[in-house]
Amino acid sequence: MRADEVKENTLTRAAIIGGGIAGLATGLFALKRQLSMRLYEGHKRLTCQDNLLWLAPNGLHLLAELGLMDEITKYGVAQEMMHFSSKKLRPLLSLNCQKLARTNGYPIIAIQRGKLYEIMLKRFLDLGGSVHYGHVLTAIREYDSSVELSFAEQVEPAKVDYVIGADGLGSRTRRCMFPGSSISYQGLRTYLGRSKTPVSSRFVGQTIEAWGNGTRFVLTSLDGVTTYWSAIERPRTYEKNSAPIPEDIIARLRQSFATFDPDILNVIEHGLVSSVHRCNFGVVAGLNKFHTDRVCLVGDAAHGMPPNMGQGASLALEDAYELTTGLASAAAPAEVFSQFDRSRRPRAKQMMQLANSMNTLFQPKSRLGSGLRNCAASIFPDQLSQHRMADLYRLPFGVPSALGVLS
Ligand SMILES: Cc1cc2nc3c(=O)[nH]c(=O)nc-3n(C[C@H](O)[C@H](O)[C@H](O)COP(=O)(O)OP(=O)(O)OC[C@H]3O[C@@H](n4cnc5c(N)ncnc54)[C@H](O)[C@@H]3O)c2cc1C
């Protein structure tokens, strides 16, 4: 079934705001269920930062459902192990991803964020979907029987039956519909970057998160040539994500991570300044439901959280699957949104609480706290954390094979 066969009629006229993972996943599952949705994206073309995403088994199940696993495995690298280690790279707690593949059907796959977007976008376009680029949502007005969307730069407003807000952590949709919600800054900042260095070969197929005092350094390599890393700190002062990257960023990081393993210092030393960008950890706060009668939030717009659990993309895919399943039934959108909220909010809340607690548990402020963390992690049985992660990374609903794979 191609999208040009999807009949656009007033009963199914809907808009998705945002062409990131949540927006594209919603668009793809909507096509699969023959729902007509227009996808509006603020950027003028596909745009995203060049960093890595770790895709967990629950998300991979849904990417497989979309028929994208060949491409994901072609460009991504299945992780054999994920280690939490001391700053000298002594493993303290490990997740065996091959075992995870046996219990959950898939391992964890690291992939360039841009590549994942490209794969999803290509399939969306191949199926006849289209992205209305350059549509920056500025305001939403909800009426009894429709929703009006206003865009920046004199783009014509649009009137639709209902709206899916997939516009990320800073969601304008959320701010319009839930003015009491906000983003709560978590006191942590990461600099993400890339380094071309011979030590990269050591990190292929494994992800290491090395723990210091108030600092963490995460790294992996897809090809043994380039290492992708993120250096997480507790800064004294707040700088916006968009603020210029200091010219001496490499020297600053070398200082902050001076006591780490020589291989980590080597990675920092080889960091490409032009690849570095900043990300402050934030979480959506003050949002008591994900929807109104005609507007529903998905992905980071609904439950943006620090990336500690590596679940943001997978939860966005779960949202997309569950919401479009409901919308494909005969029920009115308000009813579907309400059911979606009942089923998705507890799952999102659980992940948010875990992700937030990891800020404190994995990155305590004091030297004493860091020592206790390392002791606790080194005696905590890997098998227990393996079971726990396998539980969390399981899809919370069945995916009927009858739906088949899009072709
Ligand atoms: C540093 C970092 C590392 C991460 N690592 C992982 C990981 O390893 N694994 C994982 O699963 N998750 C990870 N995440 C989380 C993951 O990136 C997000 O959960 C996921 O990208 C959410 O997708 P989204 O589509 O909801 O939002 P976004 O990816 O933010 O997409 C939102 C889209 O909406 C568009 N938009 C915004 N405002 C407007 C507007 N007003 N009008 C129109 N369009 C608009 C944006 O341009 C964008 O295209 C990480 C996040 C960060 C910050």
Image: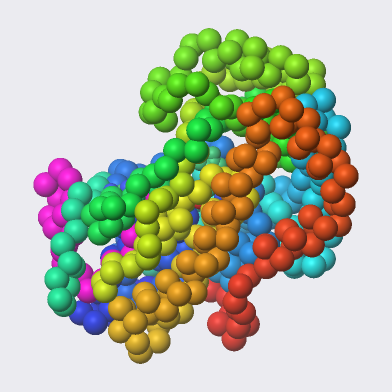
Question: Do we see residue 341 in this rendering?
Answer: yes
| Quarter of the N terminus within the rendering | bottom left
Instruction: Give above or below for 387 relative to 242.
Output: below
Q: Answer left or right for 87 relative to 24.
A: right
Residue nearer the viewer, 219 or 358: 358
Instruction: Give above or below for 104 relative to 404.
Output: above
Residue nearer the viewer, 77 or 166: 166
Residue nearer the viewer, 1 or 363: 363
Instruction: Give above or below for 271 relative to 202.
Output: above
| Quarter of the C terminus within the rendering | bottom right
Residue 188 drawn at (x, y percent): 53, 33
Task: Identify which residue is drawn at 76% across, 48% down.
Answer: 79
| Quadrant in the picture for residue 339 | bottom left
Instruction: Give above or below for 150 relative to 126.
Output: above
- Residue 162 within the segment the image draws in magenta: yes
Question: Do we see residue 224 in this rendering?
Answer: no
What colour scheme governs how the chains and residues are painted in the rendered image of this protein? rainbow
Q: Residue furthest front?
A: 368
Magenta-tinted stretch: 148-168
Residue 138 drawn at (x, y percent): 20, 49
Task: Identify which residue is drawn at 61% across, 53% down.
Answer: 354
- Residue 240 within the segment the image draws in magenta: no
Q: Answer left or right for 137 relative to 341.
A: left
